[in-house]
Image (cartoon, helix red, strand yellow):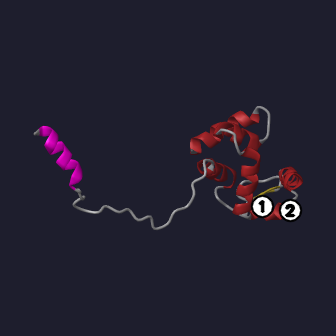
Amino acid sequence: MILMFVILMFSVPLYAPFEKVVYIERSEPINYYDPLIKAIVDYESKGDVFAFNFLEQAAGPMQIRPCRIDHYNKLTGSNYTLSDCFDMKLSRKVFLRFTNGKDWEHAAKNWNGSGPMTINYWKQIKKRL
């Protein structure tokens, strides 16, 4: 009798009482480095896309120096100038070129340069994460 009941159960179609549907109105890709980029922009320029450091000749929200943009141009065959670094999209693109594949700590330290100053730089970035 139990066997007969089990067999009959599989032949009866079952329907959910309510159809549950989730609609995603707008979706944007999330990049692993987005929180790090936000922290670096906060530290470097407080979000000011027109920030310029005359001492280091660093430009834009991520404070890109001439040697960095020159290196990027050489690697990619691009022809960007320092004034192009005021564009957040380009700054992000340059950052991702030099940090892709690294964990956040190494990416931040690499972005800052080299030497003992990178340790303090990472501490400042970590506070903002």
Using the image, determine if residue 17 lies above or below residue 121.
Answer: below
State which region is magenta. 2-12
Q: Is residue 12 left or right of residue 126?
A: left
Residue at horizontal 64%, vertical 58%?
A: 47
Residue at horizontal 25%, vertical 62%?
A: 18
Q: Residues within 10 Å of mark 1 (few under 14, many from 20)?
A: many
Image disc number at residue 8: none
Image disc number at residue 81: 2
For the residue pair 28 and 64, the one nearer the viewer reads as: 28
Using the image, determine if residue 13 lies above or below residue 101.
Answer: below
Q: Indicate the secondary structure of the residue bearing disc 1.
A: helix
Please provide percent x and percent y for residue 126: 60, 40
Image disc number at residue 85: 1
Q: Is residue 57 left or right of residue 11?
A: right
Q: Which amino acid does the dot numbered 2 rest on?
A: Thr
Please provide percent x and percent y for residue 16: 24, 58
Please provide percent x and percent y for residue 29: 57, 57
Q: Which amino acid does the dot numbered 1 rest on?
A: Cys
Residue 10 covered by magenta stretch: yes
Q: Indicate the secondary structure of the residue bearing disc 2.
A: loop
Using the image, determine if residue 18 lies above or below residue 103.
Answer: below
Q: Residues within 10 Å of mark 2 (few under 14, many from 20)?
A: few
Q: Is residue 11 left or right of residue 50?
A: left
